[in-house]
Image (cartoon, rainbow, N blue to C red):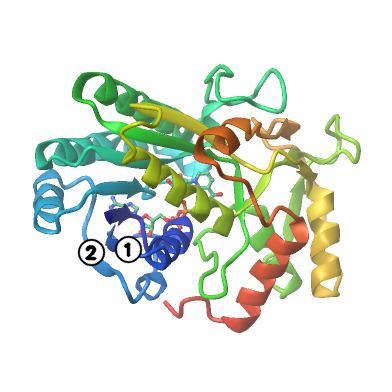
Amino acid sequence: MKVMVTGGAGYVGSVSVDAIVAAGHEVVVLDDLTTGHAAAVAPASRLVQGSYGDEPFVRELLTSERIEAILHCAARSLVGESVQDPAKYYRDNVAGGVALLEAARTAGVGRIVFSSTAAVYGVPDTTPIGEDAPLRPINTYGETKRTFEGALRWYGAAYGLRSVVLRYFNVAGASERLGEVHRPETHLIPNVLAAVEGGPALTLFGDDYPTPDGTPIRDYIHVEDLADAHLAALELTGDGAGPAPSLVCNLGTSTGFSVRDVLATAEAVVGRPVPFTVGPRREGDPPVLVASNARARDVLGWSPRRSTLESMIGSAWAWRRAHPDGYGD
Ligand SMILES: NC(=O)c1ccc[n+]([C@@H]2O[C@H](COP(=O)([O-])OP(=O)(O)OC[C@H]3O[C@@H](n4cnc5c(N)ncnc54)[C@H](O)[C@@H]3O)[C@@H](O)[C@H]2O)c1
């Protein structure tokens, strides 16, 4: 199959491109390099620099490259920024996303896999969270992801678009070739490792949550497990007999780890203490966010293979040590 991956120069997208290429498929990466890294793009794929929101350009690209399916990873994804500047998030994640769908529709590309997020659930009533839990996002980022999920559903009903929405929980870890470099970095594990390396001090936002050690519990998923799920989802969109037209799956391990678990594992992996201070809670941080991944197991035939914190933190640490300048950009 020939796949266009939007955001294939970013953290999640680049690891997935490697997996899709390794499975024997052809990949065209569409990335505007706003937060991605050209050096992260698999040499066996083709990087096209541009925006998925540029409808005529994308239509031409899909047609000339004879693309069969799209993996849509690109997005604006900073929660704080989304609340301060919702216009940017509606323009890129929603209006840009619809431009991509229109380009696909008019180019005759009827298969798409979408990077969604646990942020669509907001503060859940129960845990583990199933896909049918109410969607009540508490920030613009989650709201724009929910809105685009809705567009996929309605495009499926009206135009027969076959889509798989994947709601990631907390993505972590690295492959041998590719790691996580965001500026600013808002994710816990890279910030823990940066603090160990003498970088910015780490703040632990609240230690008085109703959890066993007082710190929030999250569901971490290895970025290579996510790539496996992307591949399974892309294949499913081409299976005329499979569930259609729109499927939604959580992607997590269904196991929760607290912030203190992450710190303890990082200390064991690195062999040094993690310096940190305790600050106040952040608004909107639920005590526990853990996925039910039963549907992904059943329908995608997927299961996480790198579920331990040791494998996620260990691979992230190994990549940082091998790439002290990140991607050098
Ligand atoms: N990393 C996580 O923990 C996590 C969790 C849940 C959901 N997600 C979702 O997964 C996806 C990937 O996240 P990531 O951490 O890899 O982000 P990232 O910032 O590393 O990658 C995003 C990529 O998209 C590109 N991009 C942005 N806007 C574009 C545009 N208009 N046209 C073309 N390319 C554009 C960027 O240059 C970058 O390469 C996002 O949709 C994000 O919302 C990530």
Residue 192 in sight from this viewpoint: no
Q: CA distance from mark 1 to mark 2?
A: 7 Å
- Quick one: 106 or 234, which is closer to the camera? 234
Mark 1, ligand 1, within 8 Å: the answer is yes
Q: Looking at the rendering, which quadrant does residue 277 occupy?
A: bottom right
Q: Is 19 located above or below residue 291 in the figure? A: below
Residue 319 x %, y %:
61, 75
* Disc 1 to disc 2: CB gap under 8 Å: yes
Q: Which mark is residue 49?
A: 2
Q: Which mark is residue 33?
A: 1
State the quadrant of the C terminus: bottom left
Residue in the image at 8% along x and 47% along y:
56
Residue in the image at 28% along x and 63% along y:
26
Mark 2 residue element: strand
Mark 2, ligand 1, within 8 Å: the answer is no
Residue 308 x %, y %:
75, 55
State the quadrant of the N terminus: bottom left
Q: Amino acid at mark 1?
A: Leu
Q: Few, some or many C-alpha atoms within 10 Å of disc 1 (few <14, some 14-19, many ≥20)? A: some
Give left or right: position of 214 versus 88. Answer: right
Residue 139 x %, y %:
51, 30
Q: Few, some or many C-alpha atoms within 10 Å of disc 2 (few <14, some 14-19, many ≥20)? A: few
Residue in the image at 23% along x and 34% along y:
98
Residue 300 x %, y %:
50, 39
Mark 1 residue element: loop
Give left or right: position of 146 versus 1. Answer: right
Give left or right: position of 170 versus 229. Answer: right
Q: Amino acid at mark 2?
A: Gln
Give left or right: position of 285 versus 133. Answer: right
Residue in the image at 85% along x and 29% along y:
210
